[in-house]
Amino acid sequence: MQAITTDQKVYTISELTREIRRTIENNFSGIWIEGEVSNFLRHTSGHMYLSLKDSGSQIQAVIFRNVNQSLRFEMKDGLHILAYGKVTVYDKRGQYQIVIERVEPKGVGALELALRQLTEKLRAEGLFLPAHKKPLPFLPNRIGVITSPTGAVIRDILHVSKRRFPSIPVLLYPVKVQGDGAAGEIAKAIEDMNRLHLCDVLIVGRGGGSLEDLWAFNEEIVARAIYNSGIPIISAVGHEIDVTISDLVSDRRAATPSQAAELAVPSAEELSARARQTRGRMTLAVKNLIAGYKEQTLHLKESYALTQPGRIVEQARQRLDDALKQIAALPGRMLVQAKNDFENLARQMTNYFKHLVEARKSDFAQRAAQLEALSPLAVLTRGYSITSNEKGKLIRSANEVRVGEEIITKVAKGEIRSKVTKIT
């Protein structure tokens, strides 16, 4: 063992750790690293702690709250990521780790991954199910539009609605449709339209663009506002090839804003044509009905019952006379036997019902005795009592009353009202 000389420096643990940290930070600052997330933990402080591993090793990592608040996707175990940051040493444990300043999913963009994750989450909750979709009104009194006041969307909707049904008013709720705060504005607009009952159908949308441009309509806050809306919503986001979460949650999806207006606004010309066709069919149906009644009336007028009513009465009298003759021809013994049979049947029925009544009375008495035994009033007759407050709530513990409170004690005969002076 080598002896310590006077010129050799002896390090404390803290000094050695600082030297190691300085060396590591100088050589491994601003690096990219890739690996699989494991042991992921989101602390109550907002910081994220995790391990990054590959097939041969692993390193501890931390993403501080000011960084992870801007993450578009959900961090979780098993996710393969690219991380940018610096390697440092955590003095307290003497453990090296990487402080992540930027992170992206490996092989797929952050926005695309976030979109996939939220889509699966909302699908599992049932927000896309057809059973939750509301029908559009046939003839709305007012149409609401939530979009930018300067974009082409509102111009297209106004043009189509004016052409199809000019007398239906269109109410614009102007919002940002992209950038920071856009999703919150859109969600609030939907909630305000519902709270104030400003329209019968809502069109929510914007023009086409990149995934980043359309991102406000992929936010969870907008999806839930659409799902909770009592007003039917038509989503008109982007062009035909663009599908957002808002499209999936909405009651109807339109490929373009113009198509959304056609879904919301009926055509006045088409309605007039349908009304004319319906009126023609109703007129023809009434004429056919009158002709049928006229034919039936003529048929009744010529019927045997109306032309020869006396003959029908005569035939009925004749059939009655024949029946009386047949009864009178019955032998006397048969009449006596029929009378005896009837009297025997009457006696049997009387005895049966007497027995049935007695059985029911006995059963009722037995049930009444059982109820009497279970009745709380029976308990009161043995000296017990029931205490309740003025509202009728039973008191089972002294903790349920307060000094000065009035209570009611029910005994076998009557009630006693008392005021609480002391609780033990």
Image: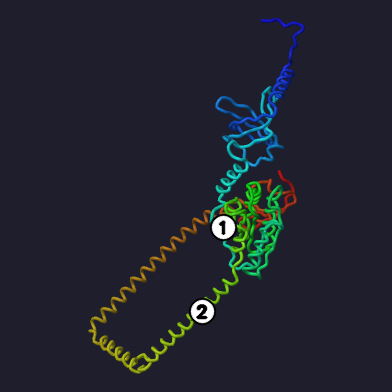
Q: Nearer the viewer, mark 1 or mark 2?
A: 2
- Circle number at residue 312: none
C-alpha separation, residue under disc 1 versus residue under disc 2: 35 Å
For residue 295, what is the image quadrant? bottom left
| Pointer 1 or 2: first along the chain | 1
Residue at 55%, 75% in the rendered image = 275
To which residue does mark 2 refer? 280
- Circle number at residue 133: 1
Q: Quadrant of the N terminus?
A: top right
Mark 1: amino acid: Lys
Q: Is residue 186 left or right of residue 6?
A: left
Q: Where is residue 196 drawn, in percent x and y?
A: 70, 61
Q: Is residue 365 left or right of residue 153?
A: left
Is 95 above or below relative to 49?
above
Residue at 37%, 71% in the rendered image = 350
Q: Where is residue 180 drawn, in percent x and y?
A: 71, 47
Q: Secondary structure at mark 2?
A: helix
Mark 2: amino acid: Gly
Mark 1 neighbour class, 10 Å CA radius: few under 14, some 14 to 19, many 20 or more: some
Residue at 58%, 47% in the rendered image = 119
Q: Quadrant of the C terminus?
A: top right
Q: 281 or 230: nearer the eye?
A: 281
